[in-house]
Image (cartoon, rainbow, N blue to C red):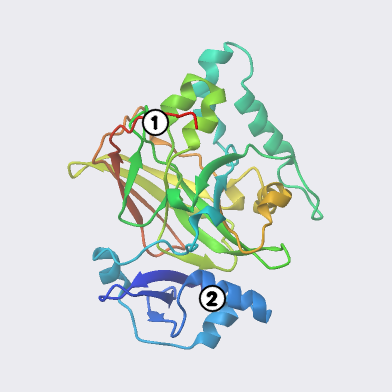
Amino acid sequence: MALRLLQVKDRDGTLQVVASDDHGAAHVLPGVASTYDLAMSAIAAGHSLADAVAKAGRGEAVDLDAALAEGRIGLPIHHADPAHFVVAGTGLTHLGSADGRDKMHKAQAGEHVTDSMKMFQMGVEGGKPENGEAGVQPEWFYKGDGSCLVGPGEALTSPAFALDGGEEPELAGVYLIGPDGTPFRLGYCLSNEFSDHVTERGNYLWLAHSKLRQASLGPELLVGELPASVEGTSKISRGGETIFDKPFLSGEANMSHSIANLEHHHFKYELFRRPGDLHVHFFGTATLSVSHGVTTQNGDRFEIEARPFRLPLVNTLATAEAAPVAVRAL
């Protein structure tokens, strides 16, 4: 039975860590202030995260559906200092993921094979090495630090200068760096790796700009192994009417890279093995509404769900007011 961890506020606003099972039964972990604290204590004791949950005992029962409806479920993990929460990801990692990207960049490449298609093919040929060896490195991007993450029910807010605010339904791995620099995978969560696809389409070298946006994480941190195939849906509604509804696939059976290979090429950099830091790493997707001609608008409702996650990830689209930046000489 899969174990899920959530961070839920009680009705007095106190943050609690909650453990739940496949059937939705959930209980508070007494004396545990945060998922981060629980994971740090497990590392210090040499225990697994599941062992740490069992050792914490069972507190009061929690109605997760009610908590979600009341907006009391937040990010499944956070760092007290968001600057020590690295948010990054990899693209062109899923079978079929090159199609939309390739179409975006064909106009620039003409009849030539695009860099996107070349990168995708490299992954197909060398992204799943055997015998624990490192495979070909994937595309990689930086999104920001923990301050760019929003939780379930919150708005995904585009900056005023953005040309697009598009959803990217995918899975993300969550990691904590131990005291000796060892990366520990805590689990997986649903995510919306929100991006600006119109900016990216303008010039592939603007990909880095297009990724510097907010992102959302689903309510649950799935502890343990991920199923080989994860099947879900990505839906957008506007004014109560569904304008986009497509399946999305993830898990290694649907990927051109193994998760271990993606992890290796992120954590091979010493910069990303700083003790005490958290990392969330987005694994990519092959399903984008922009590839189907959808132009998102403020107020659009993004809904992502997939088994083995029980609760959906829902966010709305908003745009920030313009905030001109002036650089001053000192």
Judge whether 190 appears above or below 284 on screen: below
Left/right of residue 105 with respect to residue 299 in the rendered view: right
Residue 144 image point, x, y percent? 51, 45
Q: Residues within 10 Å of mark 2 (few under 14, many from 20)?
A: some
Based on the displayed image, in which of its 4 quarters is residue 138 positioned? top right
Q: CA distance from mark 1 to mark 2?
A: 40 Å
Rendered residue at 81%/51% (across/down): 133
Give SS at disc 1. Answer: loop
Rendered residue at 68%/38% (across/down): 123
Judge whether 86 appears above or below 100 on screen: below
Residue 65 image point, x, y percent? 29, 69
Is there any visible trace of residue 46 in the rendered image? Answer: yes
Residue 327 image point, x, y percent? 45, 29
Residue ID for mark 1: 325
Task: Give the residue type at disc 2.
Answer: Leu
Task: Give the residue type at disc 1.
Answer: Val
Residue 218 image point, x, y percent? 41, 58
Residue farthest along the front direction in this orientation: 330
Q: Which mark is residue 94?
A: none
Left/right of residue 228 with respect to residue 216 in the rendered view: right
Residue ID for mark 2: 38
Based on the displayed image, in which of its 4 quarters is residue 235 positioned? top left
Give SS at disc 2. Answer: helix
Q: Nearer the viewer, mark 1 or mark 2?
A: 1
Judge whether 296 appears above or below 36 on screen: above
Is there any visible trace of residue 99 in the rendered image? Answer: no
In front: 174, or 329? 329
